[in-house]
Every structure is written in structure tokens, then in C-alpha cells.
Amino acid sequence: MPLSHSAADPALQPIVESESSLSYSYWLGTFVIRGSVAPRVLLDVLGFGLLTVAIVVAIQWMERVFQVELSLPVAPFEAAGAVLGLLLVLRVNTGYSRWWEARVLWGGIVNQSRNLAISGLAYGPRNTRWRSRFVRWIAVFPHVCRRSLREQRQFPELERLLSENSQAWIRKSEHMPDAVSSELAMMLYEARSQGMDGFAFQKCEEQRSRLIDHLGGCERILKTPLARSGAIQVRQFIFMLLITLPIGLMQAFTVDPGTGIMSIHAINQIGIVAIYVMLLAYPLLSLDRIGMELQNPFSTQRIDFLPLDSICTSIERNVLELLHDMEEQAPEAPLPGDAALPPDAEVSKLDDNLLADIS
């Protein structure tokens, strides 16, 4: 009885995956600072703590001078805090939906770039020069899209793909991705005139047009921020809650009647109320900041910006690999190994010893 293919061919044997060294760590995710909004809201939290101290001191002085009770029950503040929490969660969810949509659109750019390269190499002319130029211009497109979304007009990573004249032509274009897409369209027209099948030409054109569609979706996210009035009102609500909360907390931390001089009990009340306000201010301000950070997923000034440098370089490597796998190319065609991160790439640095999953 003949042996099965799986038994005869070692390459078809089941692959045993090695265990990953990645492990979950609650404590690392709790105390990590890099990638957190904590440094960006710390000064605001301290500001509310100082403002609380001033408010509590003023209330204590007025109660001693005018012999009036200014503290209020804390129950109304609990209801207001719950409503404000819902508004902040809605703001964060809206920002995250924009971030995720941008990632999906860039996933489309990845797929369409590969599909266009495969179709062009499979159905296009056998001309080596045309094939090399076509694949290189496909690799250029994501890099130019990334620079355009970040409002940059310098792209040192294109030095290995295009000539100086081509780079200058792209740089002077008002909309740089359109210039690259038009060049791809002209090359497809050239391929059609050299015998490319009409159906294949139509499919390649569809892939090329989808690249522009995905870029248009990214530009819509970039140029249409969330409603400014909503952000302003949420921050005003946060401010009103935090500056009036000391009035409610003072009833929970009462001060023994003094003789006109601030007693140690009053000083304790100031510190305790300020700490409670800062503890509440930290999550409120953090959620507001996260919603703001997620609005523009393309800017490297944001904490959770998309890793577009790595994505574009990965596309370049993939399409160049297709070119070299299908046929031996002339020296003018760069090798996949030449595709490295741009010299000015901004990527999140990870420590080698931080192997725990904190996401």
C-alpha cells in the first residue's frame, strides 16, 4: 500500500507551534507609563487639586465669619457624575470608531496594493522595464499617502524607488497621491496598448481606483473632526462638577467648630477633600483626553497613532518580493531586503524585557 503524501513528504508534516513567550501581566498594565495619557493629564489633575484647596479654604472662612452652613449633600453629585461618565464613554467610543475605521481603510490599502501588483505582473506585458516601474510605483503609493495624511512633503524612503525627477514631480503636486495614481493609470493604459486583456485591464483599474477610495476615507477622518461644541460642553460639565464637588464632600468631612484660627481638623479636611477631587478628576480627564487622542489616528503627536511607517514598509517589501519571485529582474529593480523603515520613522519603542500583554 503506497505511503500517504503526508508521511512521505516532511514538508507536509503537521507543524508544532512553539509556545509564545508572551504572557498576561495585570501589574505591568497597571503601572506602565509609556502609552498612557497619565503624563498628559497630570498637570490638570494637580491644578484641580490646588483649586479645591482654595475653594475649601474659602468655604471654611465664610462659615466661620458669617456663621452659615455651606456644605451640601453629596447624593446630587453622584447622579451628575453618572451622567457625565456616560457622556465621556460616548466620546471615547466615537473616537475609537474613527481610529478603527482608519485602520480598516489602511488594511484596504494593503490588500489593494498587493492585488494590483499581482494582477499587473500576471496579466501585464512581459517587458521587464514596465514590470519593474509598475511595481515600484505601487510601492510608492502608500508612502505618499502616509506623508499626505501627515501633511509632509519630504519622503527620503522614495530614494530607493524613484529618480530625483519623479520625486520632484510628486513633491510639487498639490495632491501627491493623485499624482502617483495617475502614473499607475498611465502605465495600465500602456499595458493595454501592449496586449493586456481587456478584462484584466478592467480589474486592475478597479484595484487602482479602490486605493484612492480608501485614501478618501482617511482624508474624511482627518478633515472632519468631532463636533467642537460637544467637546466644549463635556469639558465644561467636568469643570462644573469638580469645582462644586468640594461643597458636597465637606459635609462628609466635617470640621469641629474653631475659635477663629484654622485648627488641625480643618487642615485635614482640606487635604482629604483635595485628594478625593483629584482621584475623581484623574479618570474624568483621562477619558476626555483619550477621546481627543483617538480623533486623529494619523498624527505621530498622538499616543495611539497608527503604525503607518511599518505598514507602508511592509507593503513595499511584499510587492517587491512578488516582482523578484516571478522573474529575474534587472539591477534597476530594488531588492525586498532594501525596504527598511524610513529614516524619520516614528514608531513606538518597546523594551525587550516587556513581553507581557497589556492590551
Image (tube, grey):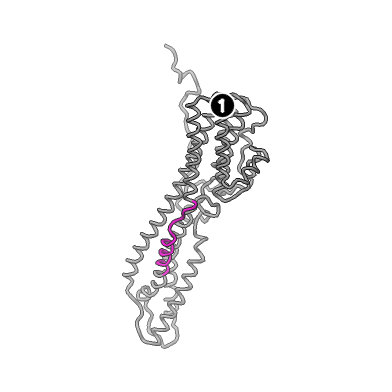
Q: Quadrant of the N terminus?
A: top left
Q: Secondary structure at mark 1?
A: helix
Q: Is residue 338 left or right of residue 29?
A: right
Q: Nearer the viewer, residue 336 or 228?
A: 228
- x, y (%) of residue 255? 38, 80
Q: Main secondary structure of the magenta part?
A: helix
The residue stretch that appears in magenta: 222-239
Q: Using the rendered view, name the quadrant where residue 79 is placed.
A: bottom left
Indicate whether 45 appears above or below 2. below
Q: Is residue 347 left or right of residue 8?
A: right
Q: Using the rendered view, name the quadrant where residue 312 is placed.
A: top right
Q: Residue at x 54, y 27 (%)?
A: 192
Amino acid under disc 1:
Ser
Q: Nearer the viewer, residue 20 or 86?
A: 86
Q: Residue 231 in magenta? A: yes
| Res. 104 visible in picture | yes
Q: Residue at x 44, y 83 (%)?
A: 262
Indicate whether 79 appears above or below 13. below
Total labels: the figure holds: 1
- x, y (%) of residue 338? 64, 36
Identify residue for label 1: 193
| Res. 294 visible in picture | no
Q: Is residue 39 left or right of residue 232?
A: right
Q: Nearer the viewer, residue 1 or 109?
A: 109
Q: Residue at x 59, y 50 (%)?
A: 152
